[in-house]
Image: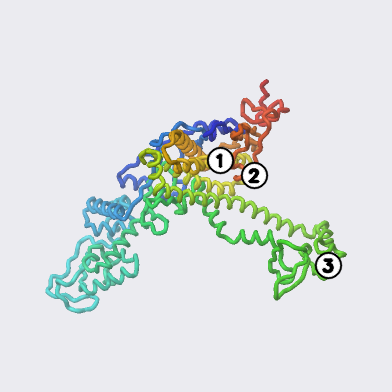
Amino acid sequence: SRLFRPNGGARLRSARSGSLSRLRRARRRPVAAMDSEDDTRDSADEDFYSGGEAGLALSDDGDADYDFADRDSDDSDDLISHRQQQNYSVLSETDIKQHQADDMNRVSTVLSISKSEACALLRSYNWSVSKVHDEWFVDEARVRTAVGLPEKQNEMPNERELTCGICFESCPRESMGAASCGHPFCGVCWRGYISTAINDGPGCLMLRCPDPSCSAAVGQDMVNLFASDEDKGKYERYLCRSYIEDNRKTKWCPAPGCEYAVEFVVGSGSYDVSCGCSYGFCWNCTEEAHRPVDCSTVSKWILKNSAESENMNWILANSKPCPKCKRPIEKNQGCMHITCTPPCKFEFCWLCLGPWSDHGERTGGFYACNRYEAARQEGAFDDSERRREMAKNSLERYTHYYERWAANQSSRQKALGDLQSLQNDKLEKLSDIQSQPESQLKFIIEAWLQIVECRRVLKWTYAYGYYLPDHEHAKRQFFEYVQGEAESGLERLHQCAEKELQIYLDADCPSKDFNDFRTKLAGLTSVTRNYFENLVRALESGLNDVGAHTGQGACSKAVSSKNLGGKSKSGKNKAPVGASKSGSSTRGMDDGNIWACDQCTFANPRSARSCQVCDHQQHR
């Protein structure tokens, strides 16, 4: 199975051919076509939007297929087409109002009611057109009663003067107003009633008749008739917010200051969406986009990063409590004679925690403690030392993954800054130097967009690795290998897009080898994109195929340096770049000391006559 091959040759031999045979069968499946009719979509999405992550569709054959092989899809147009396949749409304020008006018009037309009544119905049923239709045709009377829509429009009494039900003043009929129930109130009281409700918050959208015995709805038509311009603007904003926040298919972008919303459409894609403000987030949990990690893992990781548990682990691993006042003390240098800070000022031995007055030359002086050594041999400090060692190991493991998670986040932010700088001025400068139109330099923008995306994916693979069970050795070894390969491949792309591009930016005249640079960068972009897409699919499937048939979990336990390593500039084999960064424990072996099984491809020691995994006899 060909892995990352911008410069050739990295391969992996797994313990079972079945695992990697699945990798070779992966196919890109286009996002399913979406039905444009909202009614059909509403009914089809009913279970999906209430099903959480289970609503995401799997591949057509149900297999967790993934393939790390290179594909010949270097064309930039293919990349652009790939990016355009999405199962969501970004809505501006104008789009939201248009969607809202369209829904009200459809309900008003089908049910033969006013737009104000249609708006009240949609608000009561969370802006679901299909649910409004279903409930209305099942029991119209019950729906009218619940929403506050009288079956018959009642008019105010046909008299010259009417008494207001709030201030009890007699007013001309022309200055009075009434909802569909017909209860008359003067314009001044209506204005005060509506203004108070609007200033109280979004509850004004469910406003009812001021008459205590009446439950008739007060719709937008009454608000437009009596409210001030300021109150009308507030009411419209509440209505717009209601369309997004009450609708299960739409959510606001969580980026600070962003006014876009996202409408998610059921499809064969992920929950990761990109807003019009360029912020990427998960539609399901509204956290930062985090493929290939699921939402529950992200929640645990974020909580762990902000919790006090790691602080306590650090205190336990790097300090000891004062025997007298119990305050934690860190010893970073010096002798074993410790004096606690005021007001305690207790003097004690760091090793045995006994009073320093009992210590001296006879107990080992300032840099040793015979009492501690004797007590430790008797097992007196076993429990405390074991707890301290466990806390230290746990802290080191967490720090290992967190530092690399944060480093990739920092690299991604820098890449975003470099991309913006490139788009603002450098691309135009390069176009002038190389005498090429900016339309011919899109491959550079695509490379930087891919770097930003891959940094995000690589960042979250460290959260994935932290929660990967330790007992699943095959999965962990395979994960660490492909993570290391992904990191080394991304570094090659990043270096090419950053340092090699700078050479052409600093040039004084068109370079003859610029087209070679174009080919190299476009090729690296394509290979990196394909690798990371397949890496994401593999991790999202839980690496289910890895080690599935190996009882002892042997996967890539012994791999040749030729199989694992790329080629250095001197032509010698080396371990994969980034393997140490990802914590990989995979180590190469000399090619002369191993043989690959013809049946399962496992790398066996030369001394073995049969395969250690499948018992297949060595072919000579």
| Disc sitting over residue 488 in the figure | 1
Q: Residues within 10 Å of mark 1 (few under 14, many from 20)?
A: some
Q: Position of residue 612 (x, y in %)?
A: 68, 31
| Disc sitting over residue 590 in the figure | none
Please report whichever mark, 3 or 1, sits nearer to the chain's N-terminal start: 3
- Indicate the quadrant where residue 518 lies: top left
Q: Is residue 144 above or below residue 83?
A: below
Left-right relation of 615 to 465: right
Camera-side mark, 1 or 2:
1
Q: Quadrant of the N terminus?
A: top right
Camera-side mark, 3 or 1:
1
Q: Nearer the viewer, residue 566 or 276?
A: 566
* Residue topped by disc 3: 359
Please report whichever mark, 2 or 3, sits nearer to the chain's N-terminal start: 3
Disc 3 marks a residue whose amino acid type is His
Q: Is residue 455 above or below residue 609?
A: below
Q: Is residue 609 visible?
A: yes
| Disc sitting over residue 471 in the figure | 2
Disc 2 marks a residue whose amino acid type is His
Query: Which residue is rendered at x = 17% and y = 78% of the image?
Result: 170
Q: Cα distance, mark 3 to mark 1? A: 55 Å
Q: Quadrant of the C terminus?
A: top right
